[in-house]
Image: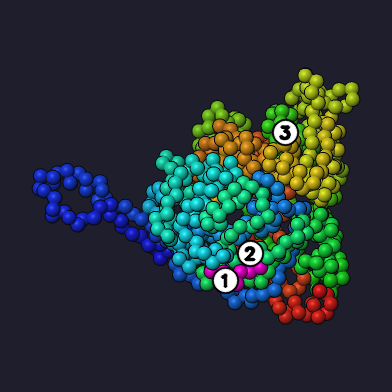
Amino acid sequence: MESNRQIVQARALDFRGWLTIPITGFLLLALMTSQLFAEETIIKSHGFSEFGDLKYPEGFAHFDYVNPDAPRGGELSYAAQGTFDSFNPYTRQGRAGARSADQYESLMVASYDETATYYGLLAESLEYPESQDWVIFNMRPEARFSDGTPVTAEDVVFSHNLLLEQGLKSYADAVREMIPRAEALDDHRVKFYFAPDIPRRGLISQVAGTSVFSKAWFEADPENRRLDKSRLEPGIGSGPYVLDSYDINRRIVYKRNPDYWGDHVNVNVGRNNYDSIRIEYFADSIAAMEGFKAGTFTLRQENNSKSWATAYDFPAIANGTVVRVELEDGDVPNASGFVMNLDRPQFQDPKVREAVQLGFNFEWTNESLQYGLFQQRDSFWQGTHLEATGLPEGRELEVLQSLGDALDPAVLTDQPVVAHESRAERQNDRRNLRAAMKLLDEAGWQVGEDGIRRNQNGEVLAIEFLSDQPTLDRIIQPFVANLRTMGIDATYNRVDNAQFTLRRRDRDFDMIFGGYPSSLQPSTGLYQQFGTEAASYSVFNPSGAHGPDIEPLIDNIVAATNSEELFANVRALDRVLRAKRIMVPTWYLGKYWVAYWDMYEYPENLPPYSLGVEDLWWINAEQEAQLKSSGALR
């Protein structure tokens, strides 16, 4: 919509001085002006959308999904599990404390009721040519870091370069190739240049969402304040909350910055309503549940089906002091499951991977262990318009055919791979186990006299499940038992949080429960998830999956200039990934389980793409006072 952006016709050369040019140069001038005087359309806007128009016009008062009159005050408190030893969320060393990245703001923020759409935060507007060869952000001069110093274009350039020099390798390598240069045009105008001959989609949103650090803070002690070092010093950001206090492995408290610069900005209206946010740490979910029941913290987003089904029977639930709700989640569920590390030799053969999949009984697990609360996941874009269904046709078929010999021919002729069905009556579905054992026989893993499978070199078919979550014990152990029935030397190893984090980052595991975040507008992030160049080290690709049948599809997705082309290529990628059987697909919920002490309130029209507990909800002070006066809460 023209109301959402301003079109500026920019001339490449000033016309002043024409009369001073000798007549003999007229022909040369005519040639020059046919090129240099050509009008270039520059788009200037308050927001950016990958496809389509912006929902919110310039000068909008606030997002539709907020309560602009939400009262401010009180404390949000919730639990975290495990440990922390750092407030630097960008390092590969240690475990960062909860919310440690939230103090850093970006040039633009995502809308919760639009896909791939962003509006200005640190930047009040942006401008770019139709070619999207570059982008300029016009920053808000009033923006300040928490120490009161201004946020400038130099800070943005410094942050971009720091992430390339000291950030995660998979991120830095990908971004460096796409965005080779950033420049501060003046104190409040920053320009990013995009590399030639690469697709433009996702580049503007990439730089718009990059965290902005204080250059002065990092340069005051460059050795100890490196981005790749673990540290308890939190740094300086420009966000609404700052670190107030912490007790290692027990508690973190953030308080609202009373001098926060951005309260008046339209994207912040109705948000950031708590005076403080407290995170209580617990060793496991059982201890955390007891802490919630005792009022040690007051809001719990449940992720354990057994707890949701059985643990909420305490007196505060019965008398209404604690509220228990299910809220819709409109976003695409993450592609989660038991991920196989394709770098391990035992997973090189797809028949082995399919056999491992057949060892998991979702139906029995869901009915016997998860109270029938989940649905089976098949797709990497489950339940959306991006999910591959039926036989490929139309543009999707053309895209797949273009992959030639790199593509498994069965992808063209078969239905997309779906999770197998199992009998819910018993843990070990013998029909599936027989099929799995046949596949292992065909893959050359024969059963020995001891019941363990070995290959022709005498190597044992062994699989270690690695986890740091006690709640997964009851899910993984029956799966391990089924694999052992098949002759696989399967073991389950639950380690502490720090060891799991290290081994997960180094991809030092056979199988873990993990997965891939999904998006309704996938773009350049796919290179870090499934790209060939980053496959050996990317922390965003736990399986290490990549290949000549994947890379061209990512290229097409990033290069897509319309939704039809995007959809066709994402469906093709979904079909290819599912055929590779890189993980055992498990379950998804499609809603949020939330329990809270009855002092929280939230907007009636919660957005589809965020629950918004931390930035859209608020405290009812009167109800909080009643809970405390009654003795229900301290």
Circle 3: element type: helix
Q: Disc 1 marks which residue?
A: 259
Answer whether residue 315 is visible to the viewer in this image: yes
Query: Which kind of residue does numbered mark 3 sit on?
Result: Arg
Instruction: Tell me the residue that label 2 is attached to.
Output: 242
- Residue range corresponding to the magenta coloring: 254-261
Task: Please report contact status of discs 1 and 2: CB closer than 8 Å, yes or no.
Answer: no
Q: CA distance from mark 3 to mark 1?
A: 55 Å
Q: Which residue is mark 3?
A: 353
* 1 or 2: tag closer to the N-terminus: 2
Q: As rendered, which of 483 and 127 lies closer to the eye?
A: 127
Residue 260 magenta: yes
Label 3 packing within 10 angstroms: few (<14), some (14-19), many (20+): many
Task: Tell me the distance, in whole angstroms, between the alpha carbons under discs 1 and 2.
Answer: 11 Å
Pick whichever of labels 3 and 1 is earlier in the sequence: 1
Residue 605 covered by magenta stretch? no
Residue 114 in sight from this viewpoint? no
Is 250 placed left or right of 536 in the picture? right
Q: What's the residue type where badge 1 is placed?
A: Asp
- Label 1 Cα neighbours within 10 Å, binned few <14 / some 14-19 / many ≥20: few
